[in-house]
Structures are given as C-alpha cells and as structure tokens.
Amino acid sequence: MNEKEFIDLQVFLVEPSHTQQLIIKNFLLDLGISNITVIESGKETLEMLKQCTPDLIMSSMYLPDMTGADLVHKIRGDSDSYDMAFLLISSETNINYLEPIRQAGAIAILPKPFSSIELDIALSSTLDYLNPQKVELNYLDIEDISVLVVDDSPTSLKYITKILNDIGIERVTQATDGQQAYELYNSHIFDIIVTDFNMPEMDGMQLTNAIRSESSQKAIPILMLTSEQNQNRLAAVKKAGVSAILDKPFEPAAIRKLISQLLN
C-alpha cells in the first residue's frame, strides 16, 4: 500500500506504556501518518471522542481503567462513534480475552511485537473499511441480493450488517441463532447466508447440515464467519457443506471478494 494513501489517517493511539507509545508512533510515522493523538486510558478516550472523531483507534488490551474489549464495546454502543475502525495491539493469546474483540468488529488484532508488514495490512483494511467498494456481480444487481445474517452477538450482528450495507447489499435479514435462521430460511428466499459458528439452540454447523439435508433450497451459498480455532471442528464444518470460511476479525475486502465469487 502506498504511503500517500495512509497520510491523511487520523489515529487515536490508546496505550499506557510510554515505551510502546514510542515504538508504535515510529511505525506510524514511517508510513507517513503524523496525525496521532496519544491517550493512556479508556475513560480519556471516550471523553476525547466527544470532541473529535478519528478514523482509527489503535488500543492496547490492558488499560488502567478497562480492557480493550470494554473500550471497543463502548465505542460500538455509541452511534456517534460506531463507524470508526478499531485495531487491537496485544500480546494476549487467550481466546477468552480475544473473543469479545473479534465479536465487536475489530478491523484486526496485531501481536506485540508486530512487523511493518502486519501493520501495513491492518491499515490497508482500515482504508477499505473507511472507503468501501461495492461487490461486482456478473449477472445480478447487488441491490437485489437478499442476505440472511446469523449471529448470537448483537454487536457482531450489527457490525456484519454494516459491512454488507457498505459493499452494496441493502436487503439484510438478521437472526440471532441457527434455529431462528432455519425458520426464516424456510419461509423466505435468500441468495446467500452469512453465519457465525458458535451459537446457542442451533450452531452454524447444525444450521448448515439442516439446510443441506432437509431444505428445498439446498444449494444456497453459506459463508461462515468465525473465530473458532479448533481445526477438527473447522474440518467438520467444511464437511457439512459450508461454501467458504472467513476468520474473525475479517477484512472488508475479503468478504467482498468471497461474496462476489460465491454469487458469480
């Protein structure tokens, strides 16, 4: 990605460690990003957001007064700051701590330490999130496409719907678990299903199995968005007939490309 495309990004860097502040700022400066506001706590960040709306918030996991997960959920719960891109930088590997970040719609999760290449990819995703392009279809109008989105996390459901709207898909129906989704599926016509894996009542694999074996619309493309890391479970999902699997957090360009491939 060309530095000129990054240069106008306005960034809030939420990091209590002065050493880490310096390291991350130098990475950003090397990419031409100079509009950087350094903040040390979650509360201060939320106060600053009332005065200024950055393009990107880069946050550490552990802040003096809250976690990065708490911060992103508060941001996503505020309609005025909802659209900002959120990037977590953390050495945390425990899935229980990272899962809320994945579900809240982080643009990326970078490790500590991260490489310039990893940062470049994350910032490219940020630009794509801020300046979305519509899905290009060969034989269909994207405005006519009807999508069923299934996720038990209200925050994740809202975020996925926003991404779909941004890439031109306006007809989005939401379901909060596989059972509700299956009932909707049997009473409506959809062009594609975008579903989470781990859900109550009926999970993504059970939903896929039911559609592929019992439904009259067996051939519908099913795109699974998941933070599941267990390879045996993911292999079982693929065997069940999922059309494609995309990890959370996902890049907006990746979901746009997959939907284009599945519908073309």
Image (cartoon, rainbow, N blue to C red):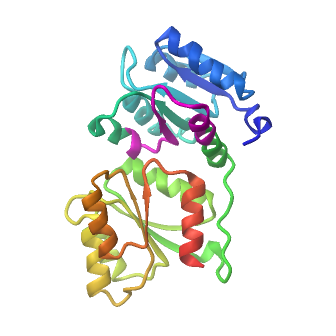
Give the residue at x 25% y 60%.
232
> Can you say whether 73 is above or below 210 in the image?
above
Coordinates of residue 140 in the picture (x, y in percent): 64, 81
| Residue 121 lies within the magenta run | yes
> Can you say whether 170 is above or below 161 in the image?
below
Coordinates of residue 105 in the picture (x, y in percent): 46, 45
Q: Tell me which corner region of the image, top left, top right, bottom left or bottom right, holds residue 121.
A: top right
Q: Is residue 5 left or right of residue 92?
A: right
- Single out the residue that lies furthest toward the left: 201
Of 26 and 75, the residue lying toward us? 26
Give the residue at x 36% y 25%.
67
| Viewport quadrant of the N terminus | top right
Q: Is residue 234 left or right of residue 162?
A: left
Coordinates of residue 115 in the picture (x, y in percent): 56, 31
Coordinates of residue 230 in the picture (x, y in percent): 27, 53
| Viewport quadrant of the C terminus | bottom right
Give the residue at x 41% y 81%.
188
| Residue 103 lies within the magenta run | yes
Q: Tell me which corner region of the image, top left, top right, bottom left or bottom right, holds residue 117.
A: top right
> Can you say whether 164 is above or below 145 in the image?
above
- Single out the residue that lies furthest toward the right: 4
Q: Is residue 155 visible?
A: yes
Of 173 and 205, the residue lying toward us? 205
- Single out the residue that lies furthest toward the bottom: 216
- Single out the residue that lies furthest toward the top: 18
Q: Is residue 31 left or right of residue 77?
A: right
> Can you say whether 192 is above or below 246 in the image?
below
Q: Is residue 80 visible?
A: no
Please state the extent of the stretch shown in magenta in the rendering.
101-122
Give the residue at x 52% y 42%.
107
Q: How many marks?
A: 0
